Image (cartoon, rainbow, N blue to C red):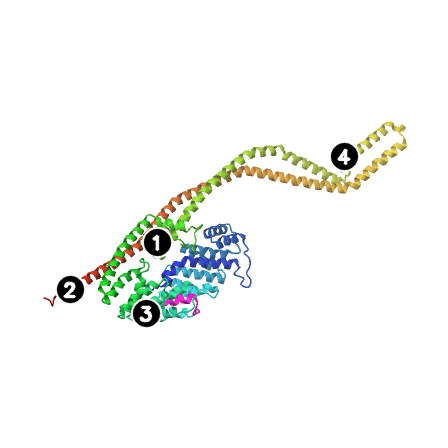
Amino acid sequence: MGRLVSRRSRRSSWRRAAGALALACACAAAQAAEAPKKPGPVQAPHYGDTLFHFFQDKYFTAITTLMASQEFGRIAPHDDEAEILRGGMLLSYGLHREAGEIFAQLIERGASPATQDRAWYYLAKIRYQRGLVDSAEQAVTKIGKNLPPALEEERVLLHANLLMAKGDYAGAAEILGTLPAKSNASLYARFNLGVALVRGGEGERGEKLLDEVGQAKELPGEELRSLRDKANVALGYSALQSSRPEAARLALERVRLASLHSNKALLGFGWAAAELKEPRKALVPWTELVQRDISDSAVLEAHIAVPYAYAELGAFGQALERYEQAIATFDQEAKNLDESIAAIRSGTLVNGLLERNPGEQMGWFWAIDALPEMPHASHLAQVLAQHEFQEAFKNFRDLRFLADNLKGWQENLVAFEDMLANRRQAYAERLPKVRERTSKADIAALAARSDAVTAEVQAAESAADGVAFADERQQALMARIEEVRANLQALGADAEPAARERARLAGGALIWQLAQEYPARLWEAKKGLQTIDAGLADAQRLDAALEQAQRDEPARFERFAERIKTLGGRIQGLVPRVAALSNEQQGQVQELAVAELERQKERLAVYATQARFAVAQLYDRATAQRKDDRAPSQ
């Protein structure tokens, strides 16, 4: 019987789903989701920087950049969208508590209806992930009508899963009825509900839903076609368990031969024929199955099903030969599994996966694309198919990334120490030179001279004395006129009247000229004083800044040095912790892989025991037959 997709196989894509939700939030934020009529640009450059890294799949850089920008208040007016994005990214890394706190805070502080609906949806998703079904259902019921279409489908699925978790299959079916019949979400939901109903004892209703999925036509993409095959396999095995081999055969023959589920379908098809007492028809799928990779449990079972069919046909010699071949195959496969287990324990698998699948950063969309060199690579299929292994390996890879990140910051701190040392040296070398230059400029004396000149200008302005603003030429003329007057005064009556008149006229003309030029020269003098005052103010400011710098810069250097030291200590403490966690996680990854191979060994042992028991039965039957053949002659 198939597993619930939403509980296991769909849960394995939880990180990708969370990443997709965060991506949807980022798109909404980038397009100004609050203005639905016309998308707008990102208004905060620092938020744009976060989105730049996010859309380049550099999620660790995106979240650290975002948190740094939020710390300095550089995200407005995108605060709510940024918090939704941060919550989605934290959620994708498995930090459910931190993400839940973010969404709860958004709701409490009264964000926009669209933001609140998304926050309620994420809270419901987190609570469902934690198994808090009632709390998750309360959150779902508070979601309004403001979710985008993609999230609206996810909301319906989530609500249906919550109802199924509570055993309310009728309510889940009603909720799922609101989805388009051919939507991807509807197919997954119908499959889940069908499996749940069959397990809950409502086989008829469950098989009806599985049959709808199993007969779906024109499905786009391999994922949905694989789901259809899985539904038919689940339907076929449900019919086998209820002793309806004909119905099982009808469902199983719809499974594609190249499907991931074809092995189970072929095995079930053979058992349906065997149950109908048609061992010859059972041999057809089983013979095909034994030629496939033996690491699959269905193939293992086929190795003893084929001789069973020969025995049912009375071909005991062929049955015995096939059983013996199966035993030899099982023994060899057990040895191969031991070799694979040894290689896994030595670290070949984990280190090889890292080397063959490099990635710059942590991320939920990262996937294993290339397999490492292993003694028997076919054994990896069952290992890599495990959700637990995938998640454990992602955690290990994330720890390795964090270790590299810490190593990079250790190197950066060394560079920062060098930069700080260079700054200190440059400061020590330049300070004496700057002090020498500033000491030559006596700012106090210059300020005193400025005050004296200002007083002279103000006195000249008060007396309207144009003579005070005479230039050098005019001052020389004034001195010459005074000299002429003095000479004329010394001559007394002997001085010529014409000379006295010319001296008077020259002096008057000069006084008149100075009076005419007085307003302009007063304005120029005041302007010059303003320039001097501004220059003095700048000089005083720079002098004060220099004095302040001499007090602050050494303290600033010390603060940087202390911060580098503190961060260095934190990193130094984190490095061994991350290394220990990485080693522990590597051991867990390897043990998960080994446990799967050990389970395969256990299945091998069970089938080998059955095969040996069947061989013994055949020998017993042959012995009894020989005794019966000799009895008449005696």
Of residues 547 and 276, which is closer to you in this image?
A: 276
The answer to which quarter of the image holds residue 624 is: bottom left
> Would you say the magenta stretch is mainly helix, strand or loop?
helix
Numbered tag placed on residue 377 in the rendering = 1
Which of marks 1 and 3 precedes in the sequence?
3
Pointers 3 and 1 in contact (C-beta within 8 Å): no
In the rendered image, which quarter is residue 600 located in?
bottom left
Query: In the rendered image, which residue does mark 2 sit on?
Result: 626
Residue 472, numbered circle: 4
Q: Nearer the viewer, residue 423 or 206?
A: 206
Q: Looking at the image, do the residues carrying marks 2 and 3 touch, with CB atoms under 8 Å apart?
A: no
Label 2's element? helix
Q: In this image, 244 relative to 371: left or right?
A: left
Of tags 2 and 4, the one toward the viewer is 2
Q: Residues within 10 Å of mark 2 (few under 14, many from 20)?
A: few
Dot 1 crowding, Cα within 10 Å, few <14, some 14–19, many 20+: few
Mark 4 and mark 3 lie on one chain; the one further toward the N terminus is 3
Label 1 to label 2: alpha-carbon separation: 47 Å
Q: Nearer the viewer, mark 1 or mark 2?
A: 2
Q: Secondary structure at mark 3?
A: helix
User: Are circles 1 and 2 on residues that touch, CB within 8 Å?
Assistant: no
Circle number at residue 611: none
Does the image show residue 167? no
* Magenta segment boundaries in residue numbering: 178-193
Disc 2 to disc 4: CB gap under 8 Å: no
Which mark sits nearer the N-terminus, 1 or 4?
1
SS at mark 4?
A: helix
Measured Cα–Cα span from mark 2 to mark 3: 39 Å
Give the residue number, with chain letter if any, for mark 3: 249
